[in-house]
Image (cartoon, rainbow, N blue to C red):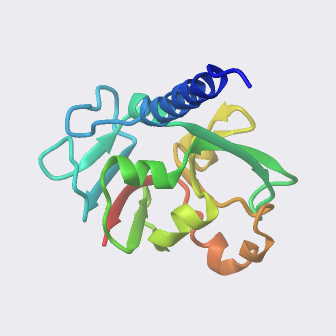
Amino acid sequence: MNKFLLPRFLQNLFVLFALFALANVSYALDMSKDQAVGPVVLKINGKIGTKNTADAAVFDEALLDALPQKSFVTETPWNKGPVRYSGPLLSDVLKAVNASGTNIKAIALNDYKVNIPMEDAKKYGVILAREMDGKKIGIRDKGPLFVMYPFEQFPELKVSKYYSRCIWQLQSISIE
Protein backbone atom coordinates (compact mmCIF):
# COMPACT_ATOMS: atom_id res chain seq x y z
CA MET A 1 0.00 0.00 0.00
CA ASN A 2 1.28 3.44 -0.88
CA LYS A 3 2.43 5.31 2.24
CA PHE A 4 0.94 8.55 0.86
CA LEU A 5 -2.50 7.11 0.16
CA LEU A 6 -3.87 7.29 3.72
CA PRO A 7 -2.64 10.85 4.43
CA ARG A 8 -4.11 12.05 1.10
CA PHE A 9 -7.37 10.30 1.95
CA LEU A 10 -7.44 12.09 5.32
CA GLN A 11 -6.61 15.41 3.63
CA ASN A 12 -9.45 14.93 1.16
CA LEU A 13 -11.79 13.96 3.97
CA PHE A 14 -10.81 17.08 5.92
CA VAL A 15 -11.40 19.28 2.85
CA LEU A 16 -14.78 17.63 2.31
CA PHE A 17 -15.83 18.27 5.92
CA ALA A 18 -14.58 21.87 5.73
CA LEU A 19 -16.58 22.50 2.55
CA PHE A 20 -19.66 20.93 4.11
CA ALA A 21 -19.29 23.14 7.19
CA LEU A 22 -18.85 26.26 5.06
CA ALA A 23 -21.88 25.37 2.96
CA ASN A 24 -23.99 25.09 6.09
CA VAL A 25 -22.95 28.45 7.52
CA SER A 26 -22.72 30.48 4.35
CA TYR A 27 -26.44 31.24 4.49
CA ALA A 28 -26.43 32.15 8.18
CA LEU A 29 -27.86 35.56 8.81
CA ASP A 30 -26.52 37.85 11.46
CA MET A 31 -29.83 39.41 12.43
CA SER A 32 -28.05 41.81 14.79
CA LYS A 33 -26.35 43.36 11.72
CA ASP A 34 -28.58 42.45 8.77
CA GLN A 35 -31.29 45.07 8.39
CA ALA A 36 -34.50 44.92 6.42
CA VAL A 37 -34.12 47.39 3.55
CA GLY A 38 -37.36 46.63 1.73
CA PRO A 39 -40.88 46.35 3.11
CA VAL A 40 -41.07 44.15 6.22
CA VAL A 41 -42.89 40.89 5.50
CA LEU A 42 -42.30 39.16 8.85
CA LYS A 43 -41.76 40.40 12.39
CA ILE A 44 -40.61 38.07 15.18
CA ASN A 45 -40.59 39.02 18.86
CA GLY A 46 -40.82 37.36 22.25
CA LYS A 47 -38.20 34.88 23.42
CA ILE A 48 -35.56 35.61 20.81
CA GLY A 49 -31.88 36.25 21.39
CA THR A 50 -31.14 38.25 18.26
CA LYS A 51 -32.93 41.36 17.01
CA ASN A 52 -32.31 43.85 14.23
CA THR A 53 -34.67 46.50 15.64
CA ALA A 54 -35.15 47.71 19.20
CA ASP A 55 -37.77 45.12 20.09
CA ALA A 56 -37.90 42.50 17.32
CA ALA A 57 -36.29 40.77 14.38
CA VAL A 58 -37.79 41.86 11.08
CA PHE A 59 -37.39 40.23 7.68
CA ASP A 60 -37.84 41.67 4.23
CA GLU A 61 -37.81 39.59 1.04
CA ALA A 62 -34.01 39.80 0.75
CA LEU A 63 -33.42 38.48 4.28
CA LEU A 64 -35.81 35.58 3.67
CA ASP A 65 -34.05 34.93 0.34
CA ALA A 66 -30.72 34.69 2.21
CA LEU A 67 -31.95 31.53 3.93
CA PRO A 68 -31.91 28.16 2.16
CA GLN A 69 -35.15 27.53 0.31
CA LYS A 70 -37.00 24.22 0.49
CA SER A 71 -39.74 22.90 -1.75
CA PHE A 72 -42.21 20.07 -1.54
CA VAL A 73 -45.39 19.04 -3.30
CA THR A 74 -48.45 18.40 -1.19
CA GLU A 75 -52.23 18.49 -1.33
CA THR A 76 -54.26 20.71 0.97
CA PRO A 77 -57.96 21.40 1.48
CA TRP A 78 -57.45 24.84 -0.13
CA ASN A 79 -56.26 23.75 -3.57
CA LYS A 80 -57.48 21.38 -6.25
CA GLY A 81 -54.73 18.83 -6.65
CA PRO A 82 -51.09 18.86 -5.55
CA VAL A 83 -49.17 22.16 -5.31
CA ARG A 84 -45.42 22.81 -5.03
CA TYR A 85 -44.76 25.09 -2.05
CA SER A 86 -41.36 26.78 -1.64
CA GLY A 87 -39.78 28.93 1.03
CA PRO A 88 -37.39 28.86 3.96
CA LEU A 89 -37.72 26.26 6.67
CA LEU A 90 -39.46 27.71 9.70
CA SER A 91 -36.70 26.13 11.81
CA ASP A 92 -34.05 28.16 9.88
CA VAL A 93 -35.99 31.38 10.45
CA LEU A 94 -36.25 30.60 14.17
CA LYS A 95 -32.56 29.71 14.32
CA ALA A 96 -31.65 33.05 12.70
CA VAL A 97 -33.29 34.91 15.60
CA ASN A 98 -32.12 32.46 18.29
CA ALA A 99 -35.67 31.58 19.33
CA SER A 100 -35.81 29.78 22.66
CA GLY A 101 -39.46 29.24 23.53
CA THR A 102 -41.73 26.24 23.16
CA ASN A 103 -44.67 27.88 21.38
CA ILE A 104 -45.02 29.94 18.24
CA LYS A 105 -47.94 32.34 18.21
CA ALA A 106 -48.50 33.08 14.54
CA ILE A 107 -50.54 36.14 13.57
CA ALA A 108 -52.05 36.84 10.14
CA LEU A 109 -52.73 40.16 8.43
CA ASN A 110 -56.40 39.89 9.49
CA ASP A 111 -55.37 39.26 13.15
CA TYR A 112 -56.19 35.54 12.98
CA LYS A 113 -53.94 33.80 15.50
CA VAL A 114 -52.84 30.21 15.88
CA ASN A 115 -50.41 28.44 18.19
CA ILE A 116 -47.82 26.13 16.65
CA PRO A 117 -45.63 24.01 18.91
CA MET A 118 -41.97 24.85 18.35
CA GLU A 119 -41.19 21.15 17.90
CA ASP A 120 -43.32 21.03 14.72
CA ALA A 121 -40.80 23.26 12.93
CA LYS A 122 -38.01 20.68 13.09
CA LYS A 123 -39.99 17.48 13.36
CA TYR A 124 -42.00 18.05 10.18
CA GLY A 125 -39.87 20.45 8.12
CA VAL A 126 -42.53 23.16 8.14
CA ILE A 127 -41.82 25.97 5.68
CA LEU A 128 -42.85 29.58 5.37
CA ALA A 129 -44.12 29.20 1.82
CA ARG A 130 -43.46 32.21 -0.39
CA GLU A 131 -44.18 30.52 -3.69
CA MET A 132 -46.87 28.20 -5.02
CA ASP A 133 -45.93 26.31 -8.18
CA GLY A 134 -43.00 28.68 -8.77
CA LYS A 135 -45.00 31.91 -8.44
CA LYS A 136 -44.79 34.38 -5.55
CA ILE A 137 -47.85 34.13 -3.33
CA GLY A 138 -49.75 37.40 -3.36
CA ILE A 139 -51.96 38.61 -0.54
CA ARG A 140 -55.09 37.60 -2.50
CA ASP A 141 -53.68 34.06 -2.78
CA LYS A 142 -52.88 33.58 0.92
CA GLY A 143 -49.47 35.29 0.86
CA PRO A 144 -46.97 36.67 1.12
CA LEU A 145 -46.18 33.98 3.73
CA PHE A 146 -48.13 30.77 4.22
CA VAL A 147 -47.12 28.29 6.95
CA MET A 148 -47.12 24.92 5.23
CA TYR A 149 -46.63 21.36 6.44
CA PRO A 150 -45.47 18.54 4.10
CA PHE A 151 -48.73 16.57 4.34
CA GLU A 152 -47.73 13.99 1.72
CA GLN A 153 -44.54 13.13 3.60
CA PHE A 154 -46.42 12.78 6.91
CA PRO A 155 -49.96 11.51 6.14
CA GLU A 156 -50.78 11.55 9.88
CA LEU A 157 -50.83 15.35 9.61
CA LYS A 158 -53.89 15.31 7.34
CA VAL A 159 -56.25 16.26 10.16
CA SER A 160 -57.88 19.54 11.17
CA LYS A 161 -55.40 20.07 14.04
CA TYR A 162 -52.53 20.52 11.57
CA TYR A 163 -54.54 22.16 8.80
CA SER A 164 -55.51 24.88 11.30
CA ARG A 165 -51.80 25.59 11.92
CA CYS A 166 -51.33 26.44 8.23
CA ILE A 167 -51.89 30.12 8.76
CA TRP A 168 -51.84 32.20 5.61
CA GLN A 169 -51.04 35.88 5.20
CA LEU A 170 -48.61 35.45 8.09
CA GLN A 171 -47.26 38.81 9.26
CA SER A 172 -45.77 38.19 12.70
CA ILE A 173 -44.63 35.55 15.15
CA SER A 174 -44.32 35.81 18.89
CA ILE A 175 -42.14 33.19 20.57
CA GLU A 176 -43.48 32.11 23.95
21 or 167: nearer the eye? 21
Q: Eyeballing the image, is 3 above or below 138? A: above
Q: Which residue is at a point 68% across and 79% down the rendered structure image?
A: 160
45 or 78: nearer the eye? 45
Q: Quadrant of residue 175?
A: bottom left
Q: Quadrant of residue 113?
A: bottom left
Residue 155 in picture, x, y percent from top left: 80, 71
Q: Which residue is at a point 22% across and 55% down the rendered structure image?
A: 49
Q: Is residue 141 shown left or right of residue 128? A: right
Residue 34 in picture, x, y percent from top left: 26, 31
Q: Is residue 174 shown left or right of residue 142? A: left
Locate the C terminus and report the quarter of the image it occupies.
bottom left
119 or 3: nearer the eye? 3
The image shows a total of numbered marks equal to: 0
Locate the N terminus and report the quarter of the image it occupies.
top right
Residue at far right of view: 81
Residue 125 in picture, x, y percent from top left: 61, 57
Residue 110 in picture, x, y percent from top left: 44, 60
Q: Which residue is at a point 58% across and 52% down the rendered structure image?
A: 127
Q: Eyeballing the image, is 40 above or below 7? A: below
